Image (spheres, coloured by chain):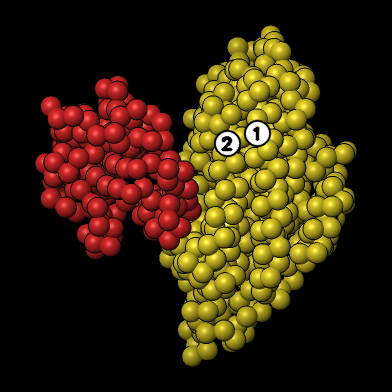
Amino acid sequence: MSSAPDSSRGTGPETGIIIGVGHSERQDDGVGPYVAQALNRRGLPAVGHEGDGTGLLDLWESRPACIVVDAMADAAAPGTLRVFTDFDDPVFARAAFVHSTHRLGLPEAIALGRTLGRLPARLVVIGVTGSAFDFGSRLSPPVAAAAEQLITRLATEDAFSDDVLAGLAPV
Amino acid sequence: MSNDTRVIQVEALARVEGEGRFKVRLDGDKVVSSEFSIFEPPRYFEGLLRGRSFRDAPDVTSRICGICPIAYIMGASKAMEDALGWQIPQPIADLRRLIYCGEWIQSHVLHTHLLHAPDFVGLPDSIELAKSNRGLVENGLAAKKTGNRIMEVIGGRSVHPVNTRVGGFYKAPSADEVRALVPELERGEALSAAALDAFSGFDFHDLEIDYLFVAMRHETDYPITEGRIVSSDGLDIDVHAFPDHFEERQVPHSNALQGVTVDGRPYLVGPLARFNLNADRLPPDILALAERAGLVPGCRNPFKSLLARQVEVIYAFREAARLARAYTPPEPSFVDEPLRAGTGHGITEAPRGICYHRYEVAEDGAITAATIVPPTSQNQRQIELDLVSTVERFHDLDDDALQWRCEQAIRNYDPCISCATHFLKLDVERA
């Protein structure tokens, strides 16, 4: 196991943070909080978040690095993982991280954060394609499998490293 | 459809809470029809409460809305306490008012700065606004963060707080935690006054509408959690008489019931109604700030609801700081007395206007009937009439500009469609 970079451990503002965005009672939308909870149990600086963009800005702005895990409602096969670091990439725009017609969601928070200079130096979004977004706390089987893969991969001491992220899925 | 017919419509309104559409048919300069439709599915909260314990009502109904959960928690709690005959000591009532200030701040600021302000400067959203007026957006984010902080300290978290219950709070926050908020609240008031000054320079389109305003009114305070129900035509009633004066009606084009007076008149609730019916309850210096910004009591320009909302943000910061300075933890932190069968009514001023709850409770505390009348349901018919006024007043605009003006008119209400279905899409049709 490689040594941990300073940005991946601890809970203070000097460390990186993993944010699992979603609603735990809406099936696959809960994959983000599910992953965050599992990583938190393993001692990583991970939190679940319901996805209000202004709250995301507050959570990540003082951090050197941030990984956001969020469900996607795109056309890919359920359980598909995508890693985004280029937020101008049209694939990101099409990934359907839809949050609300009212509150700011993840894409809006990133755009606002870029304009205001309130993004972490390193921001990675990991999208998980979902298939079921009805009431309920269970993840669909393909999304549950993807979540376990993600947890295993990120539950290393260098969760924020390029190697770990590159092993997940193509950008 | 004649050659003079125009249809202005939006299928899915943006920068509002929930899913709705709007369609106006216009023949020359006259509106033929106006429909504000809420197509978000009905959510049946009143039905699913039946048979559950009275203790569940605040937490279940808070799930009606992620923006204004406190309004539901407090309305449900007050109605249950009314049914059970529980008296709430002033220190608990004060702590409720403090957390409610947090909700007013975070809800109002999200709307004024990030959702409604872009309309007044011709920009599509807050991201473009941040490019041209970074300071205003930073101002709003800072104020919202403080509103959230109040809710976290008292409610345990900023969305769907978990520390509230019928009778009070599971655990009172410490005096140190609450008093530590004061410097941030004082900064928030100063920031919000600066934002009001910035908003005062906006172009508030020239439109006056003859509203029936309805709001709560308290003997001494600007109304949030306590007071009677008053209107601009002289109504002055206790909450128990709400069903005798107001009712909800079903319309074919909407999944949300429309609130009207029992004699069928539409009415307006929310910041403009509260301000007009309670301006004398604001501290004189805050009223002076409002008047300097162009908001004077009796205002009937719906676009100036932005100013009313921001004035209330200033007031909420002032009031929160006052309550935080005076805070000592209530002991005990909740009332829990014997049960009895009964019927209870509760009303509070949610950010978007009065929110009414009525429950019937059996001897064992089980809920046997529930009625919830949220502010957007009450405003829904008036929103349709505002669209008529807006289209007739500004019919010379081209279709795109008129559509935007209509969307802005709807956003005057900061409508919460999710609440109304416990309800947006815009169509303008020109004949």
Image location of residue B352, percent across then percent down: 64, 49
Q: Are marks 1 and 2 in contact (CB under 8 Å)?
A: yes
Q: Which residue is mark 2?
A: B149
Helix or strand or loop: what does disc 1 sit on?
A: loop
The residue located at (58%, 60%) in the rendering is B136
**Left or right of residue A157: residue A56:** right
Colour of chain A as rendered = red
Image location of residue B161, percent across then percent down: 54, 30
- Image height check: is A161 above or below B352? above
Residue in the foreground of this view, choosing between B302 and B358: B302
Image location of residue B256, percent across then percent down: 54, 50
Q: Which residue is mark 1?
A: B181
Q: Which chain is yellow?
A: B
* Res B391 quadrant in image: bottom right
Amino acid carrying mark 2 in the image: Arg
The residue located at (63%, 21%) in the rendering is B173
